[in-house]
Amino acid sequence: MLRNESKIRVRYAETDQMGFVYYGNYAQYFEIGRVAALKEVGLSYRSMEENGFLLPVKSLKVNYIKAALYDDELTIVTEVRELPSNRIRFDYLILRDKELLVEGETTLFFMTKEAKPCRPPQFFIDQLKPLFS
């Protein structure tokens, strides 16, 4: 399993008039976790794109439990629990001092630059496979 923890601090611009993190910003927080998790195992969106592959989001699910607030330090826990096939699913927890605020998931699929769905490139599988042995 691939697991990563990233820390961020909520900026004022990410909050609404009530002082809560605007709900749409959690998708960006998920992206921060996703990018960090892939980088941790030597993968990046840049290398994917340079090799002719894209990873668009197919679905996004979010369960809001408690609000994050301006200046909170948040921990984004990102996990990939299964070796990808033509899709890869990321699961997320967003915590404040170990208190669960938000849980979610994104499913992305592999696509060529010509917009054709495809299997993950071999270099992608090679980097992840040791985590699932």
Image (cartoon, grey):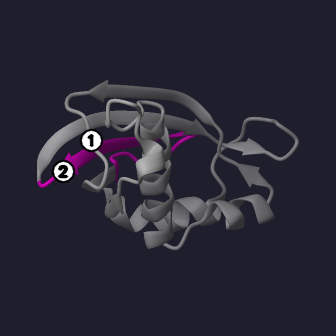
In this orientation, which residue lies closer to the viewer: 45 or 99?
99
Q: Which residues are magenta?
A: 79-97
Q: Main secondary structure of the magenta part?
A: strand
| Observer able to see residue 30 | no
In this orientation, which residue lies closer to the viewer: 41 or 27?
27
In this orientation, which residue lies closer to the viewer: 48 or 72?
72
Quarter of the image with the N terminus is: bottom left
Q: Residue at x 33, y 50 (%)?
A: 79
Question: Mark 1 belongs to which amino acid?
Answer: Ala
On screen, residue 124 versus residue 61, left or right, reads right
Question: What residue did someone put label 2 on?
Answer: 96
Does 109 sit above or below residue 122? above
Question: Mark 2 belongs to which amino acid?
Answer: Arg
The image shows residue 42 at horizontal and vertical percentages of 52, 73
Does 111 sit above or below residue 18? below
Quarter of the image with the C terminus is: bottom left
Disc 1, SS = loop
Question: What residue did someone put label 1 on?
Answer: 68
Label of residue 90 in the image = none
Q: Nearer the viewer, mark 1 or mark 2?
A: 1
